[in-house]
Image: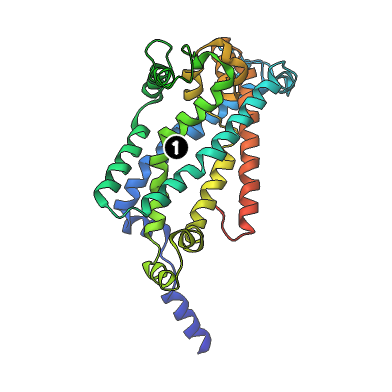
Amino acid sequence: MLQTNIRKSQHVFKQPGLTKRFMKQWDIQLMVIPALLFIFVFSYIPMYGVLMAFQDYSIFKGFMNSPWVGFKHFEMFFHAPEFWTVMRNTLVISLLKLGVGFPAPIILALMLNEINNRIFKRIVQTISYLPHFLSWVIVSGFVVSMLSTDNGSLNILLESLHLIKEPINFLSLPEYFWAILVTTGVWKEIGFASIVYLAAIAGINPHLYEAASIDGASKVRQIFSITIPSILPVIVVFSILAIGNLLNAGFEDILLLAGNPVLRDVSDVIDTYVYRVGIQNSRFSYATAAGLFKAVISVGLLAGANYLARRSGNSLW
């Protein structure tokens, strides 16, 4: 009798099958299918291309008939004269973007949260969001025009303040490139990246701020004691993703801003190196090996960052 009741209860609480759940949520599932197809077509199907890293690939012979060479192209990449320069530039630019670009939207979100004037707040948000929707071609054109020696606004300003005697060609001097690149990237993405943090801040219970205010806590104290701890899980998740993308120093921004060959020693990163060697010089197998090396290191960094974050109670998986 007891076993019969148990079976009946299990039958009552039995989860519906996959097909039934799909049909029950068919409208929602249809919204997901295009995204899954996009990822499958453009991310998973092209993955067979990594086979080129282990072949002397020829476009005339194809994947099936190109000879296999093992780790030959990886060894060539590791022993290439440009290897350490490319790795240094990749790491330095990535760390600068991480150190400056990651906390910038958090700080902007905290500042916007303290603005009581809604009209002014919306104006600031709109102005900070707009650069994200501009392509790097347009943004790089702005930067080149602003830094130009011929009627460039920055040189005109510095000359009017008597800080320089003659215009400076900033985009031809290697010592300025990293600062220009990081500053431009932060300006372009800071507003859009702050949306997530503003949404997380909006979900904080306002009674916490009222209680802290009654206890005499200042605004700065409330930020460090309430706001930041409350949005810490979001910060941790995005920090994991940022560390996983540590070797993605950039491609479009560097390619467009570093048009002068003089800047190659400070601007050539893995992505631009792969483009220059693989596309322009037609060394497809060698470029694929370099790109695969970056991908493997990125996966390792992502897994390591997630492992460390899991010990604090916040992780992606």
Front in this rendered view, residue 13 or 99: 99
Residue found at x 66% / y 26%:
87
Q: What's the colour scheme?
A: rainbow
Residue, far left? 119
Decide: few, some or many residues near mark 1? Use Cα within 10 Å; few <14, some 14-19, many ≥20.
Answer: few
Name the residue carrying label 1: 39
* Residue 60 in sight from this viewpoint: no
- Tell me where residue 298 sits by quadrant: top right
Residue found at x 64% / y 41%:
301
Front in this rendered view, residue 6 or 293: 293
Q: Position of residue 251 (x, y in %)?
A: 51, 24
Where does the C terminus fall, quadrant-wise? Answer: bottom right
Front in this rendered view, residue 119 or 219: 219
Q: Position of residue 260 (x, y in %)?
A: 52, 11
Q: In the picture provided, is 127 more to the left or to the right than 266?
A: left
Q: Position of residue 241 (x, y in %)?
A: 54, 44
Above/below status of 67 relative to 299: above
Q: In the picture provided, is 88 more to the left or to the right than 153?
A: right
Residue found at x 47% / y 85%:
5
Above/below status of 152 relative to 1: above
Q: Position of residue 215 (x, y in %)?
A: 45, 73
Disc 1 marks which amino acid? Ile
Residue, far bottom? 1
Residue found at x 32% / y 43%:
125
Dot 1: element? helix
* Residue 293 in sight from this viewpoint: yes
